[in-house]
Image (cartoon, helix red, strand yellow):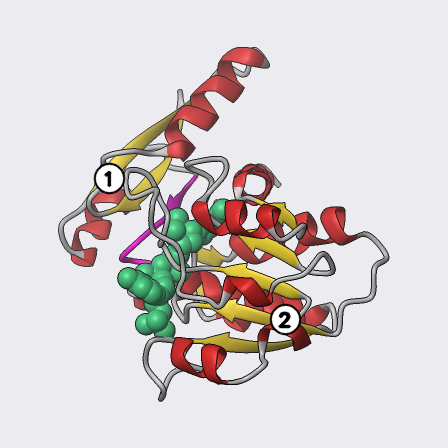
Amino acid sequence: MVKKLGLIGHPLHHSFSKRYFNKKFEKNGIIGYEYDLYDIETIDHVRDVFSIPNLLGFNVTIPYKHAIQPYLDDLDFSARKVGAVNVVKLLPNGKKVGFNSDYYGFKTSLLHWIGNKKINNALVLGTGGASKAVLVALEDLKINASTVSRDKNKGAYTYVDLTQRKVIPDHQLIINTTPLGTHPKEGEAPDLPYEQLATKHFLYDLIYNPAETSFMKKGISAGAKVKNGYEMLVLQAEKSWEIWNT
Ligand SMILES: NC(=O)c1ccc[n+]([C@@H]2O[C@H](COP(=O)([O-])OP(=O)(O)OC[C@H]3O[C@@H](n4cnc5c(N)ncnc54)[C@H](OP(=O)(O)O)[C@@H]3O)[C@@H](O)[C@H]2O)c1
């Protein structure tokens, strides 16, 4: 009997995960698994997903990373720390457990990139679900992090603060967790004083489409090092696979 995996969210037009897993199954000759999209209009419909025969688990995307939690029996350490779930596993005893593999994907990819380099301060642009996973990873790595929000009540800084004060020079690592610059709106970028960037800066964009965002291009122009979200995406997908199969 084919084991079922998938992704819940709404709307689900483009899915990296479905393409990724189907390619992985094909490339590695993995048989007996199927990865489907479950586009559910309200979270309550997750009950229908849970009743799919041979369901091993699924990924969770916008807007259900928080809303899924009351439907689960337990949260693993990662999901509890981040406060969001992007992987659900069904145990053989029927219990449903939530995990957060975005946290793992970000932390591992950041370490691959910066190596042993000591970074003291980071700026995290945006205060949504991905921002929370990034903040927990930075805390683990003992990097002081400050958030930037459009709303002065949600972040340590607003974008206006960044232009009025010399914040950028004091933060060597800047992480974009906003959707600004995502295909097809590739001309957009977070509203930063980019002229304050220097060669010491590391700009990490969680966006993976396009591969080089406007945010990254502005970093490259200033001689900064840049990275997109593709490796994080692959690492979080592989972590999901590991969770479902252990
Ligand atoms: N590479 C990966 O593996 C990976 C994993 C997860 C997410 N992502 C990407 O990360 C991005 C964010 O995902 P998410 O789940 O955190 O989304 P989200 O919960 O909607 O949060 C995005 C945050 O960005 C800020 N924002 C939204 N629209 C903005 C705008 N027009 N101008 C400035 N700031 C804006 C908001 O913060 P404020 O209201 O505080 O300004 C918002 O909370 C998406 O592009 C997603 O594709 C990538």
- Return the mark for residue 12: 1
- SS of the residue under disc 2: strand
Q: Is label 2 or label 1 in front? A: 2
Q: Decide if residue 142 is in sight here.
A: yes
Residue 198, placed above or below residue 41: below
Residue drawn at x 37%, y 48% is 181
Label 2 crowd bin: few (<14), some (14–19), many (20+), radius 10 Å: many
Q: Which amino acid does label 2 sit on?
A: Ala
Residue drawn at x 75%, y 74% is 120
Q: Note whether ligand 1 is within 8 Å of mark 1.
A: no
Q: Distance between the residues labelled 2 and 1?
A: 32 Å
Q: Between 3 and 114, which is closer to the camera in this rendering?
A: 114
Q: Where is residue 231 in the image (x, y as percent from the top left)?
A: 59, 39
Q: What residue type is labelled 1?
A: Leu
Residue drawn at x 58%, y 53% is 204
Residue drawn at x 49%, y 35% is 211
- SS of the residue under disc 1: loop
All told, the count of numbered labels is 2
Question: Where does label 2 land, which residue?
Answer: 122
Picture quarter with ligand 1: bottom left
In the orientation shown, which residue stands out farthest toward the bottom? 153
- Magenta residues? 57-66
**In magenta segment, residue 172:** no
Asked if the residue at tag 1 contacts the one at tag 2, i.e. Cβ–Cβ closer than 8 Å, the answer is no
Pick whichever of labels 2 and 1 is earlier in the sequence. 1
